[in-house]
């Protein structure tokens, strides 16, 4: 990403990680453990601000190395979530997308718009051919996102997700560049 952000509209932008985000990031995790921890394995491992800081530092390194692309969602200049290519497979021009949004910001279409923006960047600038996501079948709010964005359901990947001390099936969705409707 050139520069520090991808604009979506006057209220919404995706920003690259900065160590200065650590305090805000940790506060969101700390205040929303039950809601976020239900689906995201890293929440229980984040126990102090230093953990968030270390996450930001490693995200910067992975972004610079091209192994991942982590961005943070800012709504009216406030950090409210994250959308990322959590794995990038350069050989096969493929990436896996992941996301979370602060509980109080749900229901406004923020995640769908943020995913659309990162997907556009992935197909246009990173020359991706395929973007995928693997979601637990019980996570209905998350399942709605690939469905809304025109992803194809490829099948159930058995016990491929580990969170809350258990293995869960994953519903695999993908979008190919040729299927993508430019936004
Ligand atoms: C998954 C998650 C990001 C979904 O958030 P969300 O707010 O439901 O998603 P969106 O931002 O796309 O918003 C969609 C909602 O906004 C509504 N909406 C309002 N204005 C909208 C607009 N302009 N465009 C699209 N949707 C809009 C939609 O109707 C929908 O509401 P509904 O769920 O009541 O039908 C969120 O629940 C979350 O972070 N969960 C915890 C972490 C998690 O599960 N991560 C994914 C792991 S695989």
Image: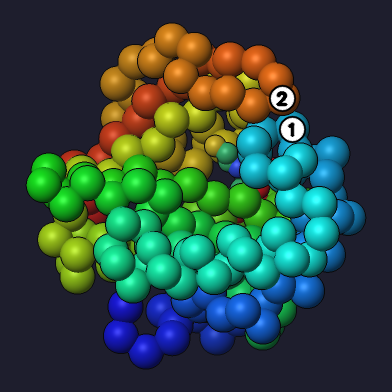
Q: Residue at the location (24% across, 54% down)?
A: 181
Q: Going by the picture, which residue comes out furthest to the bottom?
A: 3
Q: Residue extending furthest top?
A: 158
Above or below for 109 versus 145: below
Q: Position of residue 44 (x, y in %)?
A: 76, 40
Is residue 162 found left or right of 150 in the rendered image? right
Residue at 28% x, 50% y is 88
Q: Is 131 positioned to the left or the right of 59 in the image?
A: left
Say few, some or many: other residues with alpha carbon within 10 Å of mark 2 (under 14 / 14 to 19 / 20 or more): some
Relative to 79, does residue 145 appear above or below in the rendering? Answer: above
x 35%, y 30%: residue: 173
Does residue 98 appear anywhere in the picture? yes
Judging by the rendered image, the residue that carries numbered circle 2 is 164
Residue under label 1, please give it: 38
Q: Nearer the viewer, residue 95 or 106?
A: 95
Height in image: 119 above or below 43? Answer: below
Compared with residue 130, is residue 28 higher up or lower down, i.e. above or below? below
Which image quadrant: the C terminus? bottom left
In this rendering, position of residue 35 left or right of residue 159: right
Observer-side mark, 1 or 2, equals 2
Question: Which picture quadrant has residue 84?
Answer: bottom left
**Residue 151 seen in this snapshot:** no
Frontmost residue, 42 versus 16? 42
Q: Residue 145: give x, y in percent of width and height.
A: 49, 42
Q: Are marks 1 and 2 in contact (CB under 8 Å)?
A: yes
The residue at label 1 has a CB less than 8 Å from ligand 1: yes
Q: CA distance from mark 1 to mark 2?
A: 7 Å
Q: Residues within 10 Å of mark 1 (few under 14, many from 20)?
A: some
Mark 1 vs 2, N-terminal side: 1
Kindly indicate the quadrant of the structure image that contains residue 124.
bottom left
Under circle 2, the secondary element is: loop
């Amino acid at each position: 990403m050139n520069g520090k952000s991808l604009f979506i509209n006057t209220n919404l932008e995706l920003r690259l990680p900065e160590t200065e985000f650590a305090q805000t990031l940790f506060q969101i995790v700390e205040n929303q453990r039950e809601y976020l921890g239900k689906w995201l394995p890293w929440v229980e491992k984040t126990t102090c601000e230093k953990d968030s800081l270390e996450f930001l530092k490693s995200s910067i390194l992975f972004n610079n190395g091209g192994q991942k692309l982590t961005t943070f969602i800012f709504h009216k200049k406030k950090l409210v979530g994250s959308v990322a290519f959590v794995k990038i497979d350069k050989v096969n021009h493929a990436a896996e997308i992941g996301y979370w949004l602060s509980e109080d910001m749900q229901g406004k279409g923020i995640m769908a718009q943020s995913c659309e923006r990162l997907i556009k960047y992935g197909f246009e600038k990173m020359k991706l051919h395929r973007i995928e996501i693997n979601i637990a079948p019980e996570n209905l709010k998350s399942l709605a996102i690939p469905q809304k964005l025109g992803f194809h359901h490829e099948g159930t990947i058995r016990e491929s997700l580990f969170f809350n001390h258990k293995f869960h099936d994953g519903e695999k969705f993908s979008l190919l560049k040729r299927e993508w409707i430019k936004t």
